[in-house]
Amino acid sequence: MSIFRKNVLKIIAKIPYGKVASYGQIALYAGKPRAAREVGWILHQSETNPKIEIPWWRVVNNKGRVTIKGSYSNTPIVQQKLLIAEGIIFKRGLEFDIENYRWKT
DNA sequence: ATCGTGACGAACG
DNA sequence: CCGTTCGCCACGA
């Protein structure tokens, strides 16, 4: 397990209830400013290989859109539902105004 | 090593 | 507000 991967999981675990962060943000905080795609890959792996419990649904793309593909159990609808349950208002489809909920350090 | 792919992001047209 | 292109990074064939 790489150090970057460990940082990614640790940081995602810190996202507060009702807040979200982009893949790029997580990559930045974890020490690889341009590894947004890798963060997505790591989450994809964690889905079928859950070492620790993390609020994966609080990670979205930088435009405030749910871009997860309905892979295993974590589908776009499931993610949207979890976010709505935390108070996030969706505008249309899988989009919402991310600046109202973005987690900042 | 090369190539295609993806839960990304930013820049264009 | 689209859709496309390109740069980015790791994984697997």
Image: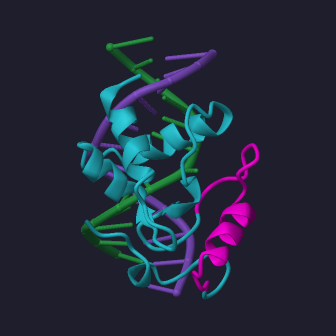
Chain colours: A cyan, B green, C purple
- Which quarter of the rendered picture does the N terminus of chain A lie within? top left
- Which quarter of the rendered picture does the C terminus of chain A lie within? bottom left
Identified at 53% across, 43% down, the residue is: A43
Q: Nearer the viewer, residue B5 or C10?
A: C10
Q: Position of A7 compared to A57: left or right? A: left
Q: Where's residue A35, x and y in %?
A: 33, 44
Above or below for A22 versus A40: below
Q: Position of B12 compared to A60: left or right? A: left
Q: Nearer the viewer, residue A93 or B12?
A: A93
Q: Is residue A2 magenta?
A: no
Mark count: 0
Above or below for A10 versus A89: above
Q: Is residue A77 magenta?
A: yes
Above or below for A61 versus A3: below
Q: Where's residue A80, x and y in %?
A: 67, 70
Q: Where's residue A31, x and y in %?
A: 23, 43
Identified at 37% across, 49% down, the residue is: A11
Q: Position of A88 compared to A10: left or right? A: right
Identified at 67% across, 75% down, the residue is: A85
Q: Where's residue A72, x and y in %?
A: 75, 43
Name which quarter of the figure residue A55 lies in. bottom right
Name which quarter of the figure residue B10 lies in. bottom left
Q: Which residues are magenta?
A: A67-90
Above or below for A72 versus C12: below
Identified at 45% across, 51% down, the residue is: A13
